[in-house]
């Protein structure tokens, strides 16, 4: 009988479902990392919210673990690459708490604008300070939404009902969807300069970390208010504190913090700041939804192998699985490569299957490509919803097949067109099982994609490779493999370097500044 550990506070519905399905469910909350590591080896499944941190060390000790179910959206408390590496499926429940979290953002906006927590404390203390708590109206104000996905869209609808004017920045928001929602799609700079209130609803990714930093805050309107019910780390807390102290920012309402649990934060104690302890998803309705959903998903997976809302694996029939498996890995890598180098809104994706692979069921392969492509921008994308998400966001997806293929038994070519440019990446299998990138932007290169890679586009000039190698070496990074390709002698060239540990932003900045470097990116697979 499979065993599941419920290590965060979930509605009792979850345990009832596990037991009804014949699964042993142990509820042990508040475990220290050491305590979790000591017992995780006994379990086939792990059901969590945001408190449990599923680190590499936990996964290394989880010898029987097959599935982690996150009752909620963000999986930033799970080391998903490490789980993938260990063959553990990671699932979330993408929609169950969206309304509740959007309502919390609206409540926080009101609480800040009318100083409700402060007025409440003062009134309970018998002070009756009527003239102290002068607020601002929300009606007619410009609300800037950063990240207009599930939660951001619900916030937009509610804010429009409050007669606010809503502008939104989201590279994936199509003009049609913006029109349907009744919001004005703008770029980030425009939003920052025009909004009276800014609310954040993006995942925390390398691209969104510090999206509201000192520079962005300085460009905001004087008297702006900031609401964050998404993730700590999106706002630079020290910069926000300085701007609140100077009066440039009139107030902030924060549900999430850079360090959680937040017991000692620079913003605590400021009377212009309203705080809640990551309560965005905390309603009985949302917790019931996500507990029920996660328990059913984990049970289905452990008992039948059915995969729903997985972030790191595909839904495939038992018959197709062995033949598709190596191509799945290749497709995930090609998609992820293209997604990690995509900077502007996606317009179209063309996947060409050539040779033997064209004879297989390519639907799951296309889903895996899209999942890899969209994952750097979206938290909740998985095999099941990748195609729908692409369609909802007006990304045109074209799949073509050809039985003939030059030089390889199979070749998969991915071409991605964004608002700014078209890029391509091609891959094949070596020895029927080993994924390799064989061409990038039509430049031949042969590389295995490892967990940490550095990718550069540069001018093909003498001295470049030496400078690149010594910069990487000086940063203490060990080079595991080095792959070069060029379009023509002296023309554009590319370089893929496998390193043994992550390339820091500082090293990347140094690399970008080297002569002849046109672009440098740190990639993770
Ligand atoms: N406070 C809470 O308790 C709570 C509860 C639920 C979710 N959350 C957080 O809210 C976030 C949003 O949830 P969701 O369900 O709306 O997710 P979602 O994936 O539906 O939407 C996220 C949106 O952010 C956009 N985005 C990604 N990168 C961006 C960028 N650089 N700039 C602007 N937009 C960008 C995406 O295009 C997408 O539309 C989650 O990632 C989670 O971290 C917090
Ligand atoms: O579980 C919670 O309380 C928070 C959930 C929320 O952060 C999410 O990403 O879904």
Image (tube, grey):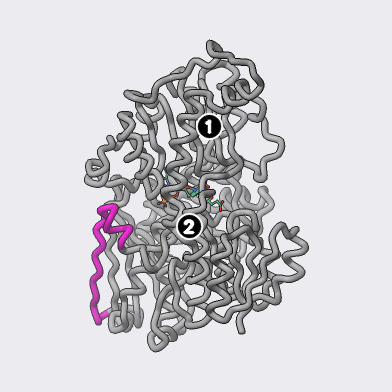
Q: Secondary structure at mark 1?
A: strand
Q: Residues within 10 Å of mark 1 (few under 14, many from 20)?
A: many
- Name the foreground residue: 260 vs 345: 260
Query: Quick one: quadrant of the N terminus?
Result: bottom right
Left or right: 231 in relation to 185? right
Magenta stretch containing residue 394, yes or no? Answer: yes
- Name the foreground residue: 101 vs 522: 101
Q: Residues within 10 Å of mark 2 (few under 14, many from 20)?
A: many
Whether residue 440 appears in this view of the structure is yes
What residue is pinned by disc 2? 495
Residue found 37% across the figure and 48% down from its top: 149
Query: Which segment is the magenta one?
Result: 388-404
Residue found 47% across the figure and 71% down from its top: 313
| Residue 137 percent across, percent down from the top left | 40, 21
Cβ of mark 2 under 8 A from ligand 1: no
| Residue 55 percent across, percent down from the top left | 66, 61
Give the CA distance from mark 2 to mark 1.
45 Å
Q: Nearer the viewer, mark 2 or mark 1?
A: 1
Tell me which label, 2 or 1, sits earlier in the chain. 1
Quadrant of residue 500 within the rendered picture: bottom right
What residue is pinned by disc 1? 253
Q: Residue furthest front?
A: 126
Left or right: 440 in relation to 54? left
């Amino acid at each position: 009988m499979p065993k599941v550990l419920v290590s965060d506070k979930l509605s009792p519905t979850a345990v009832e479902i596990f037991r009804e399905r014949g699964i042993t469910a142990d509820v042990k909350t508040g475990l220290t990392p050491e305590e979790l590591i000591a017992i995780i080896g006994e379990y086939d499944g792990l059901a969590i919210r945001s408190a449990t941190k599923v680190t590499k060390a936990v996964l290394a000790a989880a010898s029987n673990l097959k599935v982690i179910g996150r009752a909620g959206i963000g999986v930033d408390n799970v080391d998903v690459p490490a789980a993938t590496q260990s063959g553990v499926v990671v699932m979330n429940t993408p929609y169950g708490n969206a309304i509740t979290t959007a309502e919390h953002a609206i409540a926080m906006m009101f609480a800040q604008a009318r100083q409700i927590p402060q007025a409440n404390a003062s009134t309970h203390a018998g002070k009756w300070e009527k003239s102290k708590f002068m607020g601002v109206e929300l009606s007619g104000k410009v609300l800037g939404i950063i990240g207009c996905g599930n939660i951001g869209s619900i916030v937009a609808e509610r804010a429009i009902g409050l007669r606010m004017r809503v502008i939104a920045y989201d590279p994936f928001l199509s003009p049609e969807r913006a029109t349907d929602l009744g919001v004005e799609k703008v770029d980030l700079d425009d939003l920052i300069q025009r909004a009276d209130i800014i609310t954040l609803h993006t995942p925390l990714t390398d691209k969104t970390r510090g999206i509201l930093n000192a520079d962005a805050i300085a460009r905001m309107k004087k008297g702006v208010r900031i609401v964050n019910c998404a993730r700590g780390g999106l706002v630079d807390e020290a910069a926000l504190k300085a701007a609140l102290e100077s009066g440039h920012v009139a107030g902030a309402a924060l549900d999430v913090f850079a360090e959680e649990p937040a017991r000692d934060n620079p913003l605590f104690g400021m009377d212009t700041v309203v705080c809640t302890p990551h309560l965005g998803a905390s309603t009985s309705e949302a917790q019931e939804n996500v507990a029920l959903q996660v328990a059913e998903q984990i049970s289905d997976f452990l008992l039948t192998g059915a995969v729903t809302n997985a972030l790191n694996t595909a839904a495939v029939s038992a018959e197709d699985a062995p033949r598709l498996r190596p191509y799945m890995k290749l497709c995930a890598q090609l998609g992820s490569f293209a997604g990690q180098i995509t900077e502007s809104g996606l317009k179209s994706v063309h996947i060409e299957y050539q040779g033997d692979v064209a004879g297989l069921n390519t639907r799951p392969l296309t889903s895996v490509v899209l999942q890899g492509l969209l994952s750097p921008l979206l938290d909740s994308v998985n095999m099941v919803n990748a195609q729908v998400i692409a369609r909802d966001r007006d990304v045109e997806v074209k799949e073509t097949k050809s039985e003939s293929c030059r030089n390889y038994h199979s070749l998969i070519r991915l071409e991605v067109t964004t608002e700014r440019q078209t890029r391509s990446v091609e891959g094949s299998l070596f020895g029927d099982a080993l994924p390799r990138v064989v061409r990038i932007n039509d430049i031949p290169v042969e590389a295995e994609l490892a967990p940490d890679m550095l990718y550069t586009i540069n001018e093909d000039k003498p001295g470049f490779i030496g400078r690149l190698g010594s910069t990487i070496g000086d940063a203490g990074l060990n080079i595991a493999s080095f792959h070069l390709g060029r379009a023509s002698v002296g023309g554009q060239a590319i370089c893929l370097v496998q390193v043994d540990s992550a390339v820091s932003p500082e090293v990347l900045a140094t690399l970008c500044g080297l002569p002849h470097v046109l672009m440098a990116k740190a990639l993770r697979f």
